[in-house]
Image (cartoon, rainbow, N blue to C red):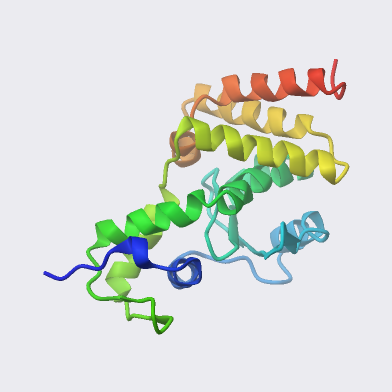
Amino acid sequence: MDYFNSATLTDAQVAEYSRQAVQQMDQKNPVAAPNDPYTQRLNRIVSRHRTVSGLPINYKVYKVPDVNAFATADGSVRVFKGLMDIMSDNELLAIMGHEIGHVINHDSRDAMKSALRRSAVRNVAASQSGLIGKVSRSQLGGLADYMLGASFSRRQESEADDYSYDFMKRNGYNVMALATSFEKLAKQSGGGGGSVTQILSTHPDSKARAQRVRDRARRDGLAR
């Protein structure tokens, strides 16, 4: 079979495949309506951050009890109801900053390229013309599942943590919200809750990462 080389895909093409996959996820999950209290809360939290590091961001809430959030290469951020239920506004912003960090650092782009390789999509890249090939619904579903469960290296996770820390500091938020969000995830994990399996499997070592944030905040004079 003549499978495409994902290395030839442009960033714009990867973003377009990500957008298509997220659209399918939006159809499969209960998305909070514009007048829903969860949407209104999220809109209030991100009102200053519709564009981050030059990337336009579109935010939506999935009314699903899982404790999870993710961002994709096209600038889509999806936050799950279960996460909103246990996090403060600043903690949610810190987690979203971490997820957006993966996008800005191109981790999400590289994960989508890997997903395209794994999906065995045939002849979809047309990099010279800039066109996007057709992808079947089942293939898009596979891409969406891969994006949702994408795991990153320890270095990538640390760099995304650093991005969120800098984002919080730059915008005048309490950087300790990043630490307390990790500590809440670690506590949830200790309780054996199945709903947090997804985010904890893709964001390991929550307690150690919280301590790393606390240590940096102390060095910066932002915490005792």
Point 60% across, 25% down: residue: 209
* Quadrant of residue 117 within the rendered picture: bottom left
Residue located farthest toward the front when viewing the structure as drawn: 128
The number of numbered discs placed on residues in the rendered structure image is: 0
Which quadrant, please, contains the N terminus?
A: bottom left
145 displayed left or right of 31: left
Q: Residue 70, percent across and down? A: 54, 51
User: Is residue 192 visible to the viewer in this orientation of the structure?
Assistant: yes
Classify 139 as above or below 207. Answer: below
Which quadrant, please, contains the C terminus?
A: top right
Residue located farthest toward the left when viewing the structure as drawn: 1
Point 46% across, 38% down: residue: 202
- Identify which residue, 142 or 125, lies in the foreground: 125
Point 45% across, 40% down: residue: 152
97 displayed left or right of 207: right
Classify 6 as above or below 153. Answer: below
Classify 130 as above or below 146. Answer: below
User: Is residue 194 visible to the viewer in this orientation of the structure?
Assistant: no
* Quadrant of residue 153 within the rendered picture: top left
Q: Residue 125, percent across and down? A: 33, 74
- Identify which residue, 89 or 114, lies in the foreground: 114
144 displayed left or right of 102: left
Q: Residue 154, percent across and down? A: 48, 30
